[in-house]
Image (tube, helix red, strand yellow):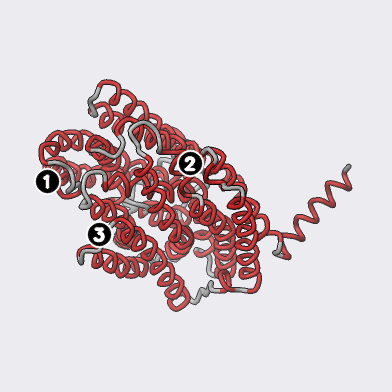
Amino acid sequence: MKRFLGAGAWLFVGIMLGRILGLVRDVIIGNQFGVGVEADRAVFVITIPDVMINILIGGAMGAALIPEFKRRNAEENWALLRQASGLVLVIVGIVTAALILSAEGLTRMLVSGLPEDAIPGTAKLVMVALLAVPITAVSAVVRARLQGEERFAVPSLAGFFYNLMIVAGLVFASGIGNLTGLAVAAVLGAGLSLLMQVWDAWRFRAPGVNAWQIEWGLVGRFLGALVAGMMILIVPVALRGFASANGVGGQTTAYLAAKLVELPMGTLLSVVSIAMFPAVAAALAKEDGFEEARDFARQGIGVILALAVPIALGMGFFAQGFADLLYRHGEMTFNDARLIAQLGAIMMVGLIPQAVNTMLLAIFNGYRDMWTPFWISLIGLAVFLGFGFAGVIDLMSLAWLYSGFHWVVMLGLLISLGGRHKMWLVDAFVGGQALIRLGATIGVFGVCFVGLQQVKVFLFPPIFVVLLAISAGGFAMIGGLMVDREIRGKVKGVILRKMGRS
C-alpha cells in the first residue's frame, strides 16, 4: 500500500479543499436563501453543468482511457490525448448547443416544483451555465492522461479552484440579488480547471505519431462505462426530481441531505479507488497479473470498509449536529435543518456500499468490462424509478430508496465479478478478520455513543457535537484496526523501531 500513500495524500488534500469550498457554497445558499424559490434556482444553476457532464461523460473517460494509456507508448499516448480531446469537444459541444436551445423545457422537467413565473429566468441562467459542459468534458480527457501517469495533485486541486470561482460567483450574486454572476462563475471555473490540467499534461507531449488512435473497441468501452456510470449518477438527479414534487424547498432539502453523504464520499472514500485504479489496470494488462490485481482489490476494499463503517456510524447517529453546524444559519429554520438531518441519517445507510462500489467498478474497468456494471446499475435504477413513479415520493421513503439502490448494485457487482471474471472478493467482507474488525468497530462506537447520550450531547453547541462525533468514529476505526493481527503487528514493529532509535 505504500505506493498509493503519496497519490492518496495528494488526492485527499486537493479533494478536501474542493469539498470544503463546496460546503462553504452550500452554507451560503442556506444562509442567503433558506429552502425557498431562490435556493432552488441557485442549486439548479450550479448543479446543471455537473449533471450534464455526468450524463455525457461521467467517470467513463478515465475508465476507458486509463487502461489504454497503460498499454501504449508515450508517442501513442500523446496522439490519443490530442485526438480524444478534439473529438470530445466537437461531440459534447453539439450536444450542449442542443441543450441550450431547449433550456426552458429542461428546467421545467428537472425542477418541477419551481413556480411557473420563475422558469424563464432560470432557463436563461442555465443557458449560460451549460457553456461549462464542453470545457469540463475536455478536462476529463486531460485528467485521465494525468492519472494514467499517477499524477493526482493538479487534477484534484483543479476542483478546488473550480469551487472557488463558484463561491465567488455566489457571493457576488447574493450581494446584487441576481444569479447571473453565479452562472458566469461556473464557466470561468471550468476554464481555469482545464488550463491547470493542460499545463501539467504538457510535460508528456511526444510528437511523432499521426495515426488515428481511437478504434471502435475503445469507443465501445467508453460507451459501456458511460451508460454504467450514468445509471448510478441519474439516481441523485431523480432523487431531487421526485423530492421537488413535495413542493417548494423539496429539491433543496434532498440536495443538502445528500451533500452530507457526499462529503466523506468525495473527500476520503473515493480517494482509495482513484489512487489504486491505475495500478489495478496495469496489473490486469499483464498475462500473469490476476493475483496482483486481486490483492489490490482486497486491500482497497479493506481500507474502504475500515473508513466507511465508522464514518457512517458517526455521521448517521450525529446527523443533527452536522446539519445544524453546516446549514442552520440565516434563513434556515430549526425544522428545515432537522428534516435535512433525518434524511441524511437514512442516506448514511447507503454510504458503505456506495464507497465499495467505487472499488468494484475500478476492477471491472481494469478488465475493460464496462457493460456488466451497466446492466446491474440499470436494474437498480429501474427499481428506484419504479417506486418513484408509483408514488413513493415522500422524502423519507426517497432516502431509503437511495440507500437501497447502492446495496443492490454492490451485491450485483460482487456476484458478477466472481461469476464472470472468477475474482471472488466475499472474504474481504465476511472473512474472519473482516468480521472481527467490523464487530470491534461497532462495539467501540456503541460504547462511545451510549456515553455521549448520558451527558446529553445533543444539547451541546453543534460544533462540539460534530467534534465528538468525529472522535467517536475515530476511536471506532482505531478499535477495528487494532484487532487485526497484521495491522497490530505492523504497529508494534514501528513502535519497536522507534524505541530502538531512541
Closer-to-camera residue (16/31)? 31
Residue 462 on image: x %, y %: 51, 39
Q: Which numbered disc covers residue 105?
A: 1
Q: Secondary structure at mark 3?
A: loop
- Inspect the image, locate mark 2, and give the three-letter code of the amino acid beneath it: Ile
Q: CA distance from mark 2 to mark 1?
A: 34 Å
* Quarter of the figure with residue 138: top left
Query: With 452 as the anchor, is 87 left or right in this view?
Result: left
Q: Secondary structure at mark 1?
A: helix
The mark closer to the camera, 2 or 3, is 3
- Inspect the image, locate mark 3, and give the three-letter code of the amino acid beneath it: Ile
34 to 492, vertically: above or below: above
Q: Which residue is the site of mark 3?
A: 393
- Inspect the image, locate mark 1, and give the three-letter code of the amino acid beneath it: Gly
N-terminal-most mark, 2 or 3: 2
Residue drawn at 25 percent across, 32 percent down:
183
Q: Is residue 219 visible?
A: no
N-terminal-most mark, 2 or 1: 2
Q: Which residue is the site of mark 2?
A: 15
